[in-house]
Amino acid sequence: MAEYKLANGSVITDDDINQLCQEFETESWVGRLERIHVGPAAVADEPLVSVTIKFPESMVAAIDAKTKNRSDFIRKAVAALL
């Protein structure tokens, strides 16, 4: 049985997840959702600014071969150099 550490430090197991799913599916879950986020995950705690750049096709192909999220890959690469 796998254990997963949550962002708040608590630990949850596969059995816990299955129990929660069963409760939710049978509408017997009594928990409370703190926040429901709609849309893509936030990448920063501040406003984002678009920066347009051009890459050679071969470089874009190499990036695409390594990731499904081109923007996130480039963002992380730049952050690693700052």
Image: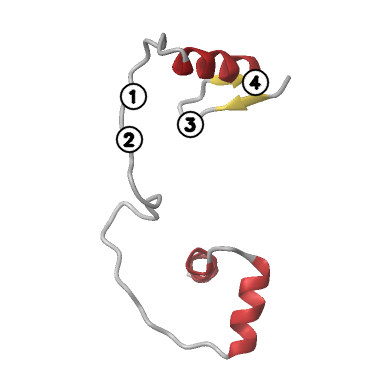
In contact (CB < 8 Å): disc 2 and disc 1 = yes
Residue furthest to the bottom in view is 56
Front residue (pair 68, 24): 24
Q: Within 10 Å of the Cα at label 1, are there few (<14), some (14-19), or many (20+) other Cα atoms? A: few
Q: Is residue 4 left or right of residue 76?
A: right
Q: Element at badge 2?
A: loop
Give amino acid for label 1: Leu
Residue 64 position, x and y percent, is 62, 72
According to the picture, the residue beneath numbered tag 3 turns out to be 7
Is 76 drawn above or below residue 4 in the view shown? Answer: below
Of badges 2 and 3, the one in the foreground is: 2
Residue 42 position, x and y percent, is 37, 51
Q: Is residue 36 left or right of residue 6?
A: left
Q: Element at badge 1?
A: loop
Of badges 4 and 3, the one in the foreground is: 4
Front residue (pair 18, 71): 18
Spatial CA distance of label 2 from label 1 is 7 Å
Give amino acid for label 2: Ile
Give amino acid for label 4: Asp
According to the picture, the residue beneath numbered tag 4 turns out to be 14
Q: Is residue 68 left or right of residue 40?
A: right
Name the image quarter holding residue 59: bottom right
According to the picture, the residue beneath numbered tag 2 turns out to be 36
Residue furthest to the right in view is 1
Mark closest to the chain's N terminus, 4 or 2: 4
Residue 51 position, x and y percent, is 35, 78
According to the picture, the residue beneath numbered tag 1 turns out to be 33
Q: Element at badge 3?
A: loop
Mark closest to the chain's N terminus, 2 or 3: 3
Spatial CA distance of label 4 from label 2 is 23 Å
Q: Within 10 Å of the Cα at label 2, are there few (<14), some (14-19), or many (20+) other Cα atoms? A: few
Name the image quarter holding residue 31: top left
